[in-house]
Every structure is written in structure tokens, then in C-alpha cells.
Amino acid sequence: MSVFRINGDRLWDSLMTMAKVGATERGGNCRLALSQEDLAGRELFMSWCREAGMDIAFDAIGNLFARRKGLHDSLAPIVMGSHLDTQPKGGRFDGIYGVLSGLEVVRSLNDLGITTRHPLEIAVWTNEEGARFTPAMFGSAVFTEALSLQTALGAKDAMGISVAEALAEIGHHGTLPFKRPFDAYFEAHIEQGPILEDNGLPVGVVTGGQAICWLDVQVIGVGAHAGTTPMPLRKDAFLGAAEMAMALEALSRDFAPKGLVTVGQLEIAKSSRNTIPGSIQFTVDLRHHEDQQIHAMEQAVGARFAHIAQQRGLGLEINRHWLSPATPFDSACVAAVRAAVEELEYPHQDIVSGAGHDAIHLARHCPTTMIFIPCVGGLSHNEAEDALPEDVRMGCDVLLNAVLRRAHRLPD
Amino acid sequence: MSVFRINGDRLWDSLMTMAKVGATERGGNCRLALSQEDLAGRELFMSWCREAGMDIAFDAIGNLFARRKGLHDSLAPIVMGSHLDTQPKGGRFDGIYGVLSGLEVVRSLNDLGITTRHPLEIAVWTNEEGARFTPAMFGSAVFTEALSLQTALGAKDAMGISVAEALAEIGHHGTLPFKRPFDAYFEAHIEQGPILEDNGLPVGVVTGGQAICWLDVQVIGVGAHAGTTPMPLRKDAFLGAAEMAMALEALSRDFAPKGLVTVGQLEIAKSSRNTIPGSIQFTVDLRHHEDQQIHAMEQAVGARFAHIAQQRGLGLEINRHWLSPATPFDSACVAAVRAAVEELEYPHQDIVSGAGHDAIHLARHCPTTMIFIPCVGGLSHNEAEDALPEDVRMGCDVLLNAVLRRAHRLPD
């Protein structure tokens, strides 16, 4: 069975050329959503797409679609893509890799003289990062109607500029309908974690997105003077919170290796060096591949925290801030990626996406999957974010062959 | 042997009248050091002193001394006192009780027609609270030459107003020399802790101030994505800090009941809900009655924290921010208080001061001790700070009789 190859040097050159737009001093990128830098990045991409014979169109939230005609052009498109916006001190690969891999697939098909049965599209989703406007991933959320257009257009940045104003400023809004049918969606991305690198593998076959549960915890004790309150008479909210954090860590071992627990934020109210903390707020981030297990984790957190609070005579309130169920990717799309990577004989493993991606929204709209490549040191959202040219090339080879399989140009 | 009594109603009335100056909505007081409210409080006190036949003088840092002549007026004065400034939302007793108890002692001696051999003075120390200017207790610190006048005068409040400017504004500076000889210093104060109330006792014979050691701890891990970093690969600085807090609590049991430990402040650098904390700073407050034991505690903290950091692969830095050695009070002064309370037949116990007081500075200058009365719920630095009129009266009775003993008006 034949396999096809993309041009790794060309893809790398495009990545490095795009990285000059909004380049930061320490080798990263700053292209905040709908900013002039984002516009410049989009325009560079659009010029490349036009050179590759593609047509450009927008929808009302500024999602950009570059289209390559199919043999049967009325069929739903097979869509590749990701985003071009970055964190304020972001890297050169997060998002950009998925967009430019899509472009490289089209360029390679042009080189090979292959026209797919389905049309192909490359999507550039608006404001994936959520660094300028919240929520993150709102372009794909509005497209899939998980978020209303009105809400997204009304979101304002720190300067008070609305999305509607920013969109009007760069002119990237159009009339493509939301939720129009896609045959499939493939998103190539750096892993943003250390697993592939640790295992020495260039490709991850992403089987889905994990479930996420965010809790807000408040522990209420009694604030008192650190020098005059005997230990047995204290109701120290911080010691309670510390014991809860230890219990959380212990709990993660019961759900190992798929269960992840993190206390990312903690605030001591009216804190002072010589005052026993009377009130603490902290966040809990729970992750698991399976919905049933995330619920079991949430329940166990509640029970263990309540036990600690009771033993210490502390007040406790736990509120669920957000619950995002697990997102299993489409088995046929995952199978296409797996078949592609096996034919290419690239070392690989199955992996679950830990971070949020536009693909998580798309999975509720059409058959969807992702392809991961390693990033150096697992580092992302960081100017030092990096990836190896070899891995960049291999991931895009997988994308090309998976898309061709999906497009029925190759027999199963 | 005769005992004398103060006028409890008069003392209570004076406390309640003073509490109208800078009264806050919830029944507390706001008289920040050297503010117009502090000036008004001082002027009220000065008018009462003049009515009681006393002379007023200041030193260069604004400490106020009201003087009652002695039979041998060239002898060093026996000094009572405390402070009239408060926290921004402070109470009606912290400091004020020590000043107005001194006044009540003088008024009672006037009623009784007693002139003591030594002159008596009431000291109002400048800026005990440290709420407007730091450091706290700088009036007594400058008087005892623990702090230079220049440093104190240069301190600025949040508005950029210096102590020198604030002092000039209220005009409460004079020429009394620092470190002039005192025969003794007695400071009556609310306990600011729950011990006396818990034990149902109206009077604490204060035998000294405990040692205080303040540490700044930094724990360095690796910040990473909460959704993509497997638990075994994490270096979570917060979990390290939480385990250190647990170790600290365990350590307090080894030094029970005199050893006190508190983590009052903690900050997660660049904290976000879905980021594993990469760097944490927190404070440790250690207290013990004995210098040797505070050193042992500090050493144990270092060893246990280092062990935890090593096991977790975390970086650790511990810096000693401040060490205040234990301050044993003068045995003769303590004996005078104990004899007074026993003659009065008031229930009492020995107690060590957990908080900082002007008396801690004075103890390095002259024979010094303190007298504690309970405060309701152990609460202080709070608008709800409260004390029972009975306890207020009994504490001042003890002050009167202890001062008379010291002044050799009563045979031992």
C-alpha cells in the first residue's frame, strides 16, 4: 500500500516565517486574537493559500476557511486546522502547527497531482488562546453553537475593546454559515505535555479529550493572633487546606495513572505574617479520561475534605465551577490516523489530550480526531516552546495519509 | 497589710469616652498613629492629665509623658503606659487600657492623698501598632535606642507622608532625652489571646515576652500544564509547601505547649487554575518562651523542610526574616505584681506575652513587667475587641498596688 510524504523543509520554513510575525525578544510569538499581529499572521497564511490555489472565506466570528476543491465538490469538506493566535508570550508551534500542516498537506497534494473526492478546507479558528478575550476557543465554540455569536461578539479585552469592534477593525468577518456539515476534522498539534518526549515517540494517536472538573473550595477557620493563641485552641484554615492538598495527592494515587489533581490557586484572606489564617479559598483541577471516574474523583474529594474539615472544626464549602465531560474522538478518524502512522512505520502511542483544543468543540459537530507531536521539555504557552523538525515532518506525514484515507483516495 | 482600690466606674467611663474619638461604624476605633484622630485622642488624654495635676512633655519621636511629682522628685520616675493609636479597624482597649489605667492610678492616688516617693509618669508611645508607619512600636524603640531617630522620622505612610511631616503637623515633638533613667515600667494590657478567658481568670502576671522567629520560605518546582503532565513527572511546589505545613504542625507537637507555629502568608507565583504551581513563597512564624527552644524549632524546621524538598525534587530557600529573643521581665517587678494580686485575692496565673508590646523594648532599658486582663473571645485588632468592666477594674487595682509597692510606700 502506498504512503505519501509531505515536504518537511517547506513546512519548517513556513513555520519559521510565520514566527517572524509578532516575534518576541526571547524567540516566542505574540499574536493576540484579532490584533494587528494576528491580522498580519492571517494575511501571510492567506497569501500562501492563494498561491496554493485555495479560496478564502470567513464566518461571522472571524473563523477563516481556506478551501481546495474536491472531485465531488458538493460533498462535505474534510477540514484540517487549528489557530494562529498566541499567548502574550507564546510559542511558535501551539496552533500554528495545525494550520500550517494543513497547508503543507494541500501543497503536497498539489505536488503529487492528487485531487481528493471531498473538498479540503483549512480552518483558522478565532481566539483559541483566550488570552485577549474570554472564553478561550470561542471561534470553534460559536461555529459549533456551543456559544452564542452575540455573547462572543460582546466579549471585551482589558482595554474595553469588544470582539465586534476588533473584528470590524481587521475586516475578517464573513457570511459562511455556522455548523455547516464537515465530513471530518483533523487537528495536528504539539502535545503540550511531556509524555511523547519521555517515551521517545514522534507521534501520538489522540483517542479523545479527558474530562475536566474544576472545584472552588473555601475553608473557614478563625483568624487569630499567631503569638497568643495556643495550638489546641486554633482553627487554622491554612493547615486545613494543606491537609486537604495532601489528601488530594493521595487520592490521585487511587486513580493513577489517568487521574490528575492540581491546586493551582490559593488565597489567604486578609493574610498577615503573624495572623492565623481565618479563611482560605483554593481551586482544585481534576482530570480523568473517563466520565465515571471524574465523578468518582469529585465525590472522593468531597468526602475527604469534609472529613478533614470536621476533624479540625473548620467550615467547608465546595462548589463545582465547571465540568467538561470526556470527549472520545471518532473511532473511524482515530483508525485512519492509526493506519497512517502504521503504514509510515513511525513509532507512536495512543494518547489522551489533556489540554483544551478546538477539536474538543468540533468533536460534537463531526467525526474528529487529533495528531500529537512532542514538544521539547513538554513546554508550551512559553516563548521557549520548541519542536524538532523531524517530529514536525512526521506528524504532518501522518496528517496527509490520514486525510487521504478519509477522502477515500486509498482503499482500506 | 492594706490594699488600695481604683475607681472602676471612672476608668470605664474614660475608656468609653476615649472610644468616641475615631469611632468606627461597628463599635471599634480608628486612630492611626500621628493622624488627626490620634491627635484628638492625645489631646483628650492630656486634658485629663492636666485636670489630675500632671505636666506634659514630649520627646523628639512624639512619645508623650505625663508626670506627677514625687516626694523625692529627682528620683527616676516609675512609668506606666502603653499607646493610644489603633489599627485601622481596631478596638477600644488594645493600648488604651494601659494608658488610661495609668491615669486612673494617678486619679486614685489623688483621691487617697498619697504622694509616692518616686515621681510617676504615664507614657503614650508613638506608633505602637505599625499600621500607618513601620516598624511597629517605633516610639519605644527610638526611646530605648533600639532604632535610630533618623530611621523612624524617615518612615513614610502609604500616601508618602513621612513621620517627620506627620509629627510637625500635630506638633507633638519635644526635647525630653531618650533613654533617660526609669525606675521601672509597668504596662497593663488586654491579653489579646484566649488563655485567661478560657481559664476563667481576671488577671495574668506576665513573666516575660516569648521569643519570635520569622522565616521566609521559597519552594521552587516546575510550573506545567495541569491537564497534560502525569503525576509522577510533576514537581508541584504547592504540594511541597502543603507537606511542609503539615510537618510544621507535627513539629509544634514536639514543642507543645509553649511552641507555636503559623503559616500566615502564602503566594503562588503566576498562579492559574490549570497550572501546576512552579514557585511558592510562604512565611513561618515560630514562637517559644525560651531562646534555646526557638533555636531548636528553627533548626528542626530547616531539617524537615529540606527533607521534604529533597524527596520531591524541589528547590528550597529559607531565610530568617527576624529573630526576637525571649524577654524575661524583671523579677522584682513581677514579684510586686504577684504580691499585689495576691493581697487583692484576685484569681490569677502567670502568663507569657505572645504579642509584641512597648514593654518588650522597655525591658531592655529598665525593670519592666506587664499585667494582663482577659479580652472577650481572645479577640483583638478587631472592632469587636471587648473586655469586661470587672476585669478592667481588677487589672487596674493590681497596677495601683504594684506601683505603690515599687514606690516603697508599702513595706515588703
Image (cartoon, coloured by chain):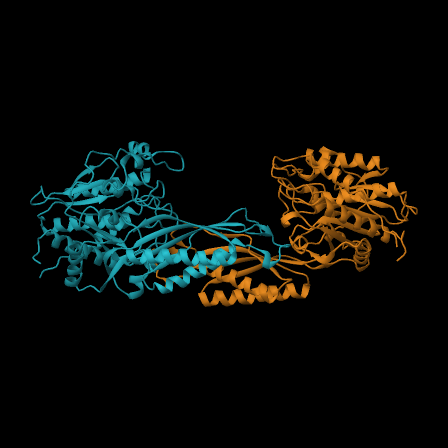
Chain colours: A orange, B cyan
Name the residue located 35 percent from the left edge and 49 percent from the top edge.
B28
Snapshot quadrant of residue B347: bottom left
Give x and y (percent) for residue B398: 18, 57
In the rendered image, is residue B95 in sight? yes
From what the image shows, is residue B262 above or below residue B125? below
Residue at 37% from the left image edge and 62% from the top image edge: B252
Give the farthest residue toward the right.
Answer: A71
Left or right for A233, reference A7 = left
Locate the N terminus of chain B and report the quarter of the image it occupies.
bottom left
B252 or B408: which is nearer to us?
B252
**Which of the two residues, B128 or A356, is positioned nearer the viewer here?**
A356
Whole-percent x, y for residue B86 in the image: 33, 46
Q: Identify the residue at image location x=46%, y=63%.
A: A314
Name the quadrant of the C terminus of chain B.
bottom left
For the point 32% across and 56% down, which residue is it? Answer: B294
Q: Could you tell me how many numbered marks the image carries? A: 0
Query: Visible in this render: residue A82?
Result: no
Whether residue B363 sits left or right of residue B410 in the image: it is right
Check the image and report above or below for A44 versus B26: above
Examine the rendered structure and indicate whether residue A285 appears above or below residue B171: below
Residue B316 placed where, x, y %? 46, 51
Tell me residue B89's x, y (percent): 38, 47
Is B283 positioned to the left or the right of B66 in the image? right
